[in-house]
Image: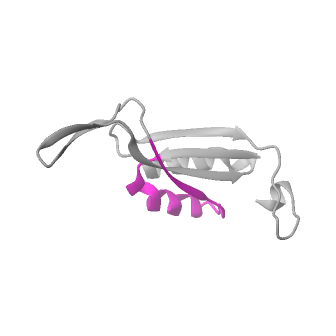
Amino acid sequence: MKLIAAIIKPFKLDDVREAIASLGVEGLTVSEVKGFGRQKGHTELYRGAEYQVDFLPKVKLEIATTDDNVEQVIEAICKAAYTGKIGDGKIFVYELLQAVRIRTGESDEEAL
């Protein structure tokens, strides 16, 4: 099993959710986060004063999936989150050692 963590632009969330749902992925956790990468933030104008915004709003998705589904999920996220501009995001894949569904006690792939 794998845990896929994707950091994407907030306005791409619905597109990504639809793309992974079409693969049959049933679970998704979404967190609003802030951060920066190569963008290094940007400057904004507020009431005539310019100021630096170092941390940009992003959305972090966490998706637990089976080993054989990982590449399809990554491809779906990449296609749906792509804008071609800096700051499109990143995807990280972690080894998932165990999963347990609390309500039924099912574990591992049955819990996904």
Residue at 69% in and 39% down: 94
Q: Quadrant of residue 53?
A: top left
Q: Residue 93 at what x, y percent from top left?
A: 65, 39
Query: Percent position (x, y) of residue 7?
Result: 50, 44
Q: Is 73 situated left or right of 110 in this image?
A: left
For the rendered model, the colour scheme is: one colour
At a point 66% along the width and 62% down the height, the residue shown is 27
Q: Residue furthest left?
A: 48
Q: Residue 39 occupies which quadrant of the picture?
A: top left
The quarter holding residue 112 reads bottom right
- Of residues 16 and 52, which is closer to you in this image? 52
Let me know if residue 56 is in the magenta part: no
Along the viewing direction, whichever of 31 and 16 lies nearer the viewer? 31
As drawn, the residue found furthest toward the bottom would be 103
Q: Which residues are magenta?
A: 8-34
Q: Is residue 32 left or right of residue 56?
A: right
Q: Toward the viewer: 56 or 29?
A: 56
Relative image position of residue 98 (x, y in whole percent): 83, 48
Counting from the top left corner in percent of width and height, residue 30 is at: 55, 57
**Going 58% across and 63% down the picture, which residue do you hit?**
21
Vertical side of 99 occupied by 56: above or below: above
In the image, residue 55 sits, relative to residue 76, either above or below, namely: above
